Amino acid sequence: MAQSTTGTIRAYRMKSSHRAVCIVLLAAGIFFFAVFLVRAIWDTEEVSLPVLLFPILFVLFGVFLTVRSFGNVLTLTQTSIELQTPFGRRALPFDKISGTRRYLAGGGGEGPEVWHIKLESNDDRFQSLDFEESYYTLDEYFDAWFRELPDLDAHTSKRLKTSNFGMV
């Protein structure tokens, strides 16, 4: 990828498969809304607002996911990593990263579990960055950059293993 004048080294967007799923959800929401609307207009049976609320919420959920999937960009620059969303931008300079954590979130029996990457900040002026690893098209360059950062999970587990919890 060519380097721009802003110092962008790599830009990572959400995977095409994730975007496609979001578009399908949006289309399904629009279809449900159209069916309920046609039913409300043409049927003699009256459709109440609570019944119409489900397809409206489905459409709004589909719009949110689709906008997010096309609007989120994870960018490595010369000096920082940035997460641009439709709702704002957060940057974490490389010298403010204390280390990384990986964790599995979600699921709970109701949905898929998703691996997250959390870049911990060592400066209170900068928020930690947390993003879904499996949603982005990360490449070998990102993996190599990521492996150079301290693994806080490994550090924590080593520190915990040295304790015998008073059992001696």
Image (cartoon, grey):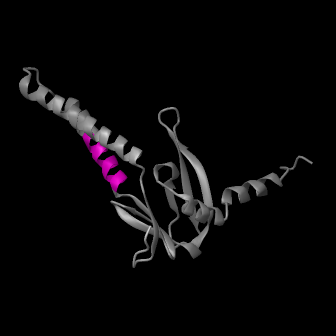
> Where, by quadrant of the figure, is residue 18 drawn?
top left
Relative to 58, say whether 129 is above or below: below
Image location of residue 59, percent across then percent down: 25, 41
At 85% across and 50% down in the image, what residue appears? 164
Image location of residue 107, percent across then percent down: 51, 38
Asked whether 62 falls inside the magenta stretch, the response is: yes
Image location of residue 13, percent across then percent down: 41, 57
Judge whether residue 166 can be spotted in this image.
Answer: yes
Relative to 135, say whether 139 is above or below: below
At 47% across and 54% down in the image, what residue appears? 137
Start-end of magenta stretch = 59-70
Asked whether 129 falls inside the magenta stretch, the response is: no
Q: Nearer the viewer, residue 4 or 158?
A: 4
SS majority, magenta: helix
Q: Nearer the viewer, residue 42 or 140?
A: 140
Residue at the farthest top position: 44
Relative to 107, say whether 44 is above or below: above
Tag count: 0
**With 149 as the anchor, is 133 left or right in this view?**
left
Image location of residue 90, percent across then percent down: 43, 67
At 36% across and 64% down in the image, what residue appears? 88
* Quadrant in which the N terminus is drawn: bottom left
Residue at the farthest right position: 168
Judge whether residue 123 can be spotted in this image.
Answer: no
Q: Nearer the viewer, residue 94 or 44?
A: 94
At 50% across and 48% down in the image, what residue appears? 134
Residue at the farthest bottom position: 5
Q: Nearer the viewer, residue 81 or 137?
A: 137
